Amino acid sequence: METLFFQVQHCPLFKDIKEERFTALMQTINYHVDNVKKNHIIAHEDDDCTSIGIILEGNIEVKKIYPSGKSITIAQLGQGKLFGEVILFSDKNKYPSTVMASTKAKILFMTKDSFSEICHQETSIMTNLLNILSKKILVLNNQLKSLSYESIRQKISNFLIQQYQKQNSPYLTLDVTRQKMAEILGVPRPSLSRELVNMKEDGLIDFHKNTVKILNLLALEEALYQDK
């Protein structure tokens, strides 16, 4: 239990919960921890969602996979992140997308009844959950905004502006590959690369491997309101 408590320290769901209290709570419910391999499918689209998942180690991806084989990465989740918490309490508790491990991962699963029980025993966990859901709504709002942009330049500009706000610097370190960035933006990988080169030639940005320097922030902002 001590190891489990150490692993959930990265999870905001248990923010400010002391080890003794955490141990007492977990002893009253049923849960299990799964070790999964890279590329393991944790849940397929339309599978029933019966548990909330907490990532103890590794990373997972939420992906929309189309019949053609094309896939779009909707979210990338790392240590301490949750999945299934929104679907679990909905009327239609089925996964809307595929959840898979992008690395080896260790995941804690709690059923709906077990999770409800610890929320009942410790109301601060419910408060923490509401905070997590609020932040997810803001992220979803940004994703919907990105989908509203039509041109690849607009999508890239919006992505870089978000990274600028997050990192508070024009010198950006991207934690995703070009392929992952293309999936996040919903554009073909070659088209993304061509437009990045075009933006570099136009003096908006400079880049090398996974670093990007914003040279003209105003031009990036103006690109969001231009029809292309």
Image: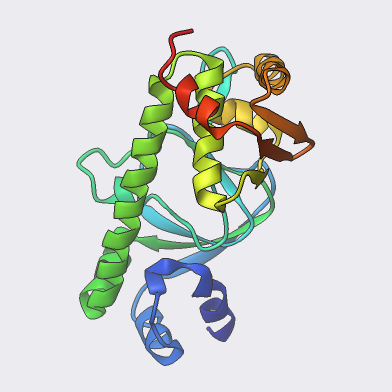
What coloring was used for the rendering?
Answer: rainbow
Tell me if residue 209 comes above or below residue 14 in the rendering. above
Q: Is residue 94 left or right of residue 4?
A: left
183 shown above or below 170: above
Does residue 63 appear anywhere in the picture? no
Give the camera-side residue of 139 and 93.
139
Residue extending furthest toward the right:
208
At a point 25% along the width and 69% down the height, the residue shown is 127
Query: Is residue 138 left or right of 9 when viewed as pictured?
Result: left
Left or right side of 215 for 146: left
Q: Hey, which residue is sitting farthest top in the picture? A: 228
Kindly identify the residue that appears in the image at 51 percent across and 63 percent down: 80
Relative image position of residue 78 (x, y in whole percent): 57, 55
Percent position of residue 180, x then y:
64, 33
Q: Is residue 99 positioned above or below 59 on the image?
A: above
Q: Nearer the viewer, residue 27 or 59?
A: 59
Residue under the point 65% across and 45% down: 172
Q: Give above or below for 120 relative to 129.
A: below
User: Percent position (x, y) of residue 176?
Assistant: 66, 40
Instruction: Give the residue displayed 54% in from the left and 77% down from the top.
Output: 4
Looking at the image, which residue sits at the far bottom?
A: 20
In x, y percent, where is residue 2?
55, 86
Q: Nearer the viewer, residue 29 or 137?
A: 137
Q: Quadrant of residue 72?
A: top right
Q: Is residue 178 visible?
A: yes
What is the number of callouts on the image?
A: 0
